[in-house]
Image (spheres, helix red, strand yellow):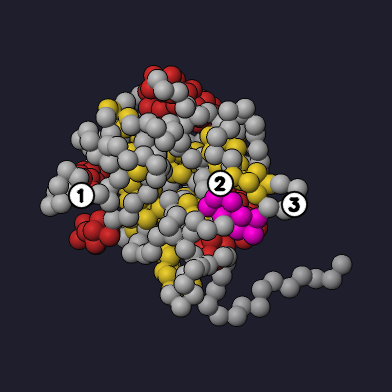
Amino acid sequence: MRTHRNIVLTCLFLLGMFTPCAFSEPAIQAGTAQVDITPPLGIPMWGYASRTEGAKAIHDPLMAKVLILQSTETTIAIVSWDVCEFQSPWLHDQMKSIGIDHLLLLCSHTHAGPDLGKPFPSADKPWLKTIEARILQTIKKAQQDMFPAYINAGEGSITLGYNRLRRDADGLSTTIFYNPGHIPFGPVDPTVGVIRVTDEKQKIRAVVVHYACHPVVLGSKNLVLSADYVGAMYRKVEQELGNDALCLFAQGGAGDINPLFQGRSEIDEENFVLVDEMGGFLAKEVLQTLSEMKPDAGKSIQLRASMETISVNHRWEPDKKLKFATTALLINSEIGIVTIAGEPFHKFQVDVREKSALPHAYMFGYCDCAHQDWPNWYFPDIESAARGGYGASDSGIGEVGTGERIINQGLIQLYTLRGMLRDKPSGGRVGKPY
């Protein structure tokens, strides 16, 4: 009997050496925090060139939400903020001093937010500087309350947008900004990505939601500050999860995708009904996806990252060079993330998902991850650039094919992080003949 018992104990010991389990030491730590970044009334708004008046009211607060992920290999600060498109070289400059290796600033792309490029409320104290200072302090706050993090991911599906570049019979595209008939012009990517972060008690502490659709439920005449459908979504998710869970949003390839919900009424309240409806539909899909992930406690095995830059020609000034960056994240050898600046088209996120050979892979668009140029504003895929239309024919400064180059670079980084691409010839496997 004693011999049999010793054999069992030996087997259990060996199994524990080679099999990760719920009781193994977590490899990833996480921290969360958030801050209100709502500007004062009167601030110029950004997202529609025709809008010249400043904000007259606030419907819902604009937020910056922070998720810190840390391993022995790297420390990453993911900041999801309710702004249209902005960079912050100053914030990137502060990261080394506080122990952050990679900063990902994810713009939600709300068109009901402030124009941070304007000197408001004054030239010496622009609101961008206030936001940057608040975000820096919030990153530090998140670092002060780290916890063992267990991460997994899942996907849902819901079609809330249409492709605003209608493909016509002659091979060209026509831009459809306003779609009162709710016609589901395609193609779109309906995938809802959900990355869940739980603590050692399996309490949900953070959820990162990835989806591709312009936050333009509110139109060009809107003068009310809002996070648009994104805010309605994350408030609903946080309300349902409770326990101070934080919901961050990572905008995907929304460059050619507009919402099927479009509030164009002269009455603000009627427009916000549609904002809440669209946000509610997305939140419901997020919560359903989370419920299907509950049996899986998640993993805390590995967190790796790399950042690279590429040089390309200016599309309209070929003698001018531009620099764009991409950061790749690998989590538990199962979740891959590739970032891209500006407004990428939806095809790129499909490419990342299909070519990464990972169970879960996402392209985070509108991401400021380093000192780099900004595309002003779009990265169309090659086919869309040839077909033309807004954002495809003349609204980006990177040469045609830049988006493909960035995404391919990110995929190279993902495969390298997985140890599948080497710096020396290896010969590879040779199979026996059948």
400 sits left or right of 121 in the view:
right
Mark 3 / mark 2, whichever is N-terminal? 3
Q: Residue at x 27, y 37 (%)?
A: 54
The 10 Å Cα crowd at callout 1, few under 14, some 14 to 19, many 20 or more, is: some
In the image shown, does 282 or 384 lie closer to the viewer?
384
Residue sitting at the far left = 124
Say which quadrant the C terminus sits in: bottom right
Q: What element does badge 3 sit on?
A: loop
Say which residue label 2 marks.
Answer: 256
Q: Quadrant of residue 35?
A: top left
Coordinates of residue 151 in the picture (x, y in percent): 44, 43
Mark 1 / mark 3, whichever is N-terminal? 1
The magenta segment: 385-392
Q: CA distance from mark 3 to mark 2?
A: 19 Å
254 sits left or right of 207 in the view:
right
Q: CA distance from mark 2 to mark 1?
A: 30 Å
Q: Which mark is residue 202?
A: none
Q: Residue at x 47, y 26 (%)?
A: 263
Coordinates of residue 60 in the picture (x, y in percent): 31, 27
The 10 Å Cα crowd at callout 2, few under 14, some 14 to 19, many 20 or more, is: many
- Magenta span dominant secondary structure: loop
Q: What element does badge 2 sit on?
A: loop
Q: Residue at x 22, y 35 (%)?
A: 42
Say which residue label 3 marks.
Answer: 170
Q: Is residue 146 magenta?
A: no
Coordinates of residue 344 in the picture (x, y in percent): 51, 53
In the image shown, does 215 or 291 lie closer to the viewer?
215
Coordinates of residue 429 in the picture (x, y in percent): 69, 71
Q: What element does badge 1 sit on?
A: loop
Say which residue label 1 marks.
Answer: 119
